């Protein structure tokens, strides 16, 4: 695709989507829509302007000029891809400026129940693209070129690809009225509450999908038909909101999956050069997903171009490469980012029955900037020995013509067990830092969580290490030492420490509620009593907002205690602490 010349993409004026300024009012009619999507964009190629933002819907959704520019450039394949017909891919951009719409209560509720790796993005937008390029002699350029883009904070790539597959072809034929009708249907969808299986009607089809929950068992399989056996039309059941066909994505790199898993675990910078945005975005998303259930705490860009506002930031040589997985299609990046420590070059996917030729491990010095052959260019040496049994099992599956989804299940289970074997010792050690419940006294400040001491943890591995659950040999200690320096350790530790602190606060509240408050109050001054009321009220608010894991019985007791304490105070203080 040609990139537009001049100062950058322009916004063509469209019927439904103008203007793109103005904040959405609280309680607006698009509250249900915004639980799923931020907005829908249409990007077209204008002969004079280049990529142009033709339409944004709902029309009052606010995008900054930088975000509009990024969406325009990332919604079209670059000139090296040569995509004819219809193609789907995705991108991820940094949100510019502050939060522009208030988070709904449902958003927070959904995030609390969602796995850490599938919570909505607070500072990034995902763009899910359906691009069409077909010959059209009636146009001056000779081609019809247009993209329909769903912008969301949810990483539900499978769901939104399916949605685009239904909406985009109709939109390209019938244009704006069709898109408006689809958006209004989405605005009737129930909220994406984790653990629920939902029927989502759109364009005469019902998509049935299970929203992932922390309570789900790994590898739980497809959602069951639920309560709508007589639904007409019969629902199209999606097996997942987000899981890609890992086997298809990793076919050319199966021999190096474990090494790539280590690079992801350590948050290493990785450039993925692919022949098209579709291959690029799927490979990057597959790499970012291979650490589940661990949250991927580094930056990742499924598709990235030289026109992105962060290009200079990622390509600078004045500091170490950032912790980012970057998917590109322009070979220019090989020259610009040849100082990056790891570069993966993949070719066109071949879907024959045999295992495709595996990319070879090559030293970075063999990288050619003009004609880079497929390969994983890195000087990194894996800490763990390769699991040859996995490759044999996948090869056997190919020989027996095992379906791709069965092969993916084998691969996903291997990566899940590998990640769990690595994380379980960390979880056990972290749990040992929690103060004992018997040490929590009602009228004293609760004890602190003990600090995480890396040397103590490494010593614990001799008796409680990953060897208990994983057969792989290798330098596990070395892998943990490098992991401690990665953004993933920092992200994991902060989240676990936060959860433990909330648990400690909840246990302290329970201890207060189980104590005899009237005996405590006998010899206390008004200042001390008021201080207790304020602390109890603050914790009650946090508990009612589900920020503390507290039972309903404890909440009732806390309310009763607050009423009892306030009732013992003078009338003027009662009015201040409990206004009518």
Image: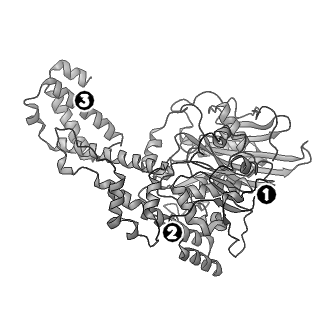
Question: Residue under circle 1?
Answer: 371
Using a 10 Å C-alpha cutoff, classify the residue at mark 3 as few (fewer than 14 neighbours), some (14 to 19) or many (20 or more).
few
SS for callout 2? helix
| Residue at the (58%, 65%) spot, across then down | 257
Mark toward the viewer: 2 or 1: 1
Classify 439 as above or below 12.
below
Instruction: Determine the residue positioned at 49% across, 61% down.
Output: 226
Judge by depth and name the residue closer to the eye, 19 or 386: 386
Report x, y in % for residue 179: 69, 43
Where does residue 127 sit, x and y in percent of width and height? Answer: 64, 45
Quadrant in which the C terminus appears: top left
Q: Earlier in the sequence, mark 3 or mark 1?
A: 1
Crowdedness near tag 1: few (<14), some (14–19) or many (≥20) residues, C-alpha within 10 Å: few
Marking on residue 534: 3
* Residue at image point 41% right, 58% down: 215
Q: How many numbered discs?
A: 3
Could you say where residue 467 lies in the image, as x and y percent from the top left?
Answer: 40, 69
Q: Residue reaching furthest front?
A: 365
Left or right side of 79 for 570: left
**Residue indicated by mark 2:** 414
Q: What is the secondary structure assignment of the residue under circle 1?
A: loop
Q: Say left or right for 111 vs 65.
A: left
């Amino acid at each position: 695709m040609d990139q537009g010349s001049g100062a950058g993409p322009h916004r063509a004026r469209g019927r439904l989507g103008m203007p793109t300024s103005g904040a959405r009012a609280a309680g607006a009619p698009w509250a249900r829509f915004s639980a799923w999507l931020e907005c829908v964009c249409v990007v077209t190629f204008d002969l004079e302007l280049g990529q142009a933002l033709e339409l944004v819907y709902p029309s009052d959704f606010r995008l900054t000029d930088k975000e509009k520019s990024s969406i325009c450039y990332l919604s079209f394949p670059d000139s090296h891809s040569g995509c004819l017909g219809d193609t789907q891919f995705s991108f991820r951009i940094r949100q510019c400026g502050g939060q522009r719409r208030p988070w709904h209560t449902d958003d927070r509720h959904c995030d609390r129940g969602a796995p850490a790796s599938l919570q909505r993005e607070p500072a990034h937008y995902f763009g899910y693209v359906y691009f069409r390029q077909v010959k059209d002699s009636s146009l001056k350029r000779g081609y019809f070129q247009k993209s329909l883009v769903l912008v969301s904070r949810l990483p539900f790539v499978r769901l939104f690809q399916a949605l685009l597959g239904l909406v985009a072809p109709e939109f390209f034929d019938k244009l704006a009225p069709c898109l408006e009708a689809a958006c209004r249907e989405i605005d009737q969808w129930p909220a994406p509450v984790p653990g629920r299986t939902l029927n989502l009607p759109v364009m005469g089809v019902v998509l049935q999908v299970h929203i992932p929950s922390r309570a789900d068992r790994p590898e739980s399989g497809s959602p069951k038909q639920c309560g709508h056996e007589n639904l007409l039309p019969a629902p199209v059941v999606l097996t997942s909101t987000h899981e890609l066909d890992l086997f298809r994505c990793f076919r050319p790199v199966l021999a190096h999956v474990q090494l790539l898993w280590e690079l992801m675990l350590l948050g290493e910078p990785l450039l993925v050069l692919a022949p098209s945005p579709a291959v690029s975005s799927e490979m990057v998303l597959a790499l970012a997903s291979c650490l589940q259930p661990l949250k991927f705490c580094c930056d990742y860009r499924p598709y990235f171009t030289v026109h992105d506002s962060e290009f200079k930031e990622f390509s600078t040589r004045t500091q170490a490469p950032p912790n980012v997985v970057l998917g590109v299609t322009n070979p220019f990046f090989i020259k610009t980012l040849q100082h990056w420590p790891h570069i993966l070059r993949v070719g066109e996917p071949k879907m024959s029955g045999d295992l495709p030729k595996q990319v070879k491990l090559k030293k970075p010095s063999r990288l050619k900037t003009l004609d880079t052959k497929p390969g994983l260019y890195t000087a990194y040496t894996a800490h763990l020995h390769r699991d040859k049994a996995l490759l044999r099992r996948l090869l056997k599956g190919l020989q027996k013509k095992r379906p791709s989804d069965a092969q993916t299940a084998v691969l996903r289970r291997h990566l899940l067990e590998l990640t769990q074997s690595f994380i379980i010792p960390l979880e056990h050690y972290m749990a040992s830092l929690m103060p004992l419940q018997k040490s929590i006294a009602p009228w004293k400040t609760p004890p602190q969580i003990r600090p995480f001491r890396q040397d103590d943890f490494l010593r614990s591995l001799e008796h409680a290490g990953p060897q208990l659950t994983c057969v792989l040999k290798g330098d596990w200690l070395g892998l943990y030492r490098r992991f401690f320096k990665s953004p993933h350790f920092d992200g994991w530790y902060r989240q676990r420490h936060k959860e433990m602190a909330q648990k400690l606060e909840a246990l302290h509240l329970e201890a207060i509620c189980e104590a005899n408050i009237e005996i405590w109050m006998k010899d206390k001054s008004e200042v001390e009593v008021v201080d207790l009321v304020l602390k109890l009220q603050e914790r009650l608010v946090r508990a009612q907002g589900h920020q503390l894991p507290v039972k309903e019985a404890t909440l009732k007791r806390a309310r009763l205690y607050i009423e009892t304490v306030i009732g013992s105070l003078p009338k003027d203080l009662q009015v201040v602490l409990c206004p009518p």
